[in-house]
Image: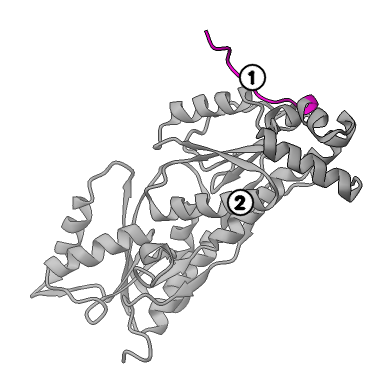
Amino acid sequence: MKKETSMPTMKDVAREAGVALGTVSKVVNGLPVGESYRIRVEDAIKKLNYQVNSYAQGLKANKTYTIALLIPNTKDPFYASLTYYINLALLKRKYRMLLCSTDFDSKQEQEYITMAQQNKVDGIIGLTYNPNLIIEESTPFVAIDRSMGPKIPCVASDNFAGGQLAAEKLAALGCKKVAFLRIGSSLTNEPNKRKAGFENGCLSCGLSYEMKILDDGTPYQEFDNFLSSHIYDGKLSFDGIFCVTDNLAYYIVKTLKKFHIKVPEDVQIIGFDGIRFFGDKDYICSTIIQPVSEIAEMCVELLLQENMLTKPPLVCLPVSYGYGGTTRETFDL
């Protein structure tokens, strides 16, 4: 029987290169050695196809250089973009990402937390829907959009300012009577502040407004019924609509088309998130843009800070407005 060839070790590399074991260790770990020694070691590594055991290296340094990301899914464009930028921010710092897609399952979230801790990750970034997550204090954690206690930093967009900006923009574009449409989690979270911001903006601008708010799991058909009940003689009683997400705004545009209501001619629509077609093309609707890359950078930066006591409980990053064809800008008038 043919004997299996064992994987080459650092000692094998040292023997092949004709150098001390400590020299190989320095080259592998990026420490300075003489140029001729470095070349000999690198040539030996290539010849033997030696693979550095980064996991074992990390254990020796009490680090695995791995961060777990809990995200509802990577199908939704906003979550996909967030995942992309968090991965970039980690790669830039020589960290790897352990992706945990929870599909909004609170039980699955806890199982992933436990699994990540068992694998000795250096920290966890989570956009979660389980308000009762059990997280070991020794595991650094940064939350996105949901405050999980004073010891866990939360990173979010300035959702209140975003809602207010949407109302102010609709008013500036000539709207007189507007609607606020929302579907989302009933849990306390930062995105819920979009509603309060919009109300505040409507009041300060003298806009008449009405709200239709649904919890997750409710059929979108409820919005169809709401809108159809506000159509009189073929005309919608609202001239502006703010949707709590771009996904919802996209759905509402299609629904209004079925009712023969034109966007933006008959009604102007603003969404929230800043989603683009194919990830980097035009906005799918006029929108309040979340600074996704900045959110990702802030999450990673806070997570890797060693002194947890200096981390703020909440970081709100500024939003902005982007034109996406569902509002009548000055060049459309």
Quarter of the view holding residue 113: top right
Q: Do the numbered discs 2 and 1 sit on residues whose CB atoms are within 8 Å? A: no
Q: Earlier in the sequence, mark 2 or mark 1?
A: 1
Residue at 69% x, 46% y is 94
Q: Position of residue 240 (x, y in %)?
A: 31, 74
Q: 95 or 284, which lies in front?
A: 95
| Quadrant of residue 118 within the rendered picture | top right
Q: Residue at x 46, y 68 (%)?
A: 288
Q: SS at mark 1?
A: loop
Highlighted range, magenta: 1-11
Marker count (numbered): 2
**Does 326 sit left or right of 115 as displayed?**
left
Report x, y in % for residue 260: 12, 72
Residue at the disc numbered 1? 6
Disc ID at residue 155 = 2
Chief SS of the magenta region: loop
Residue 2: in magenta span = yes
Gap between marks 2 and 1, in whole Å? 47 Å
Residue 220 in percent (x, y) is at 23, 51
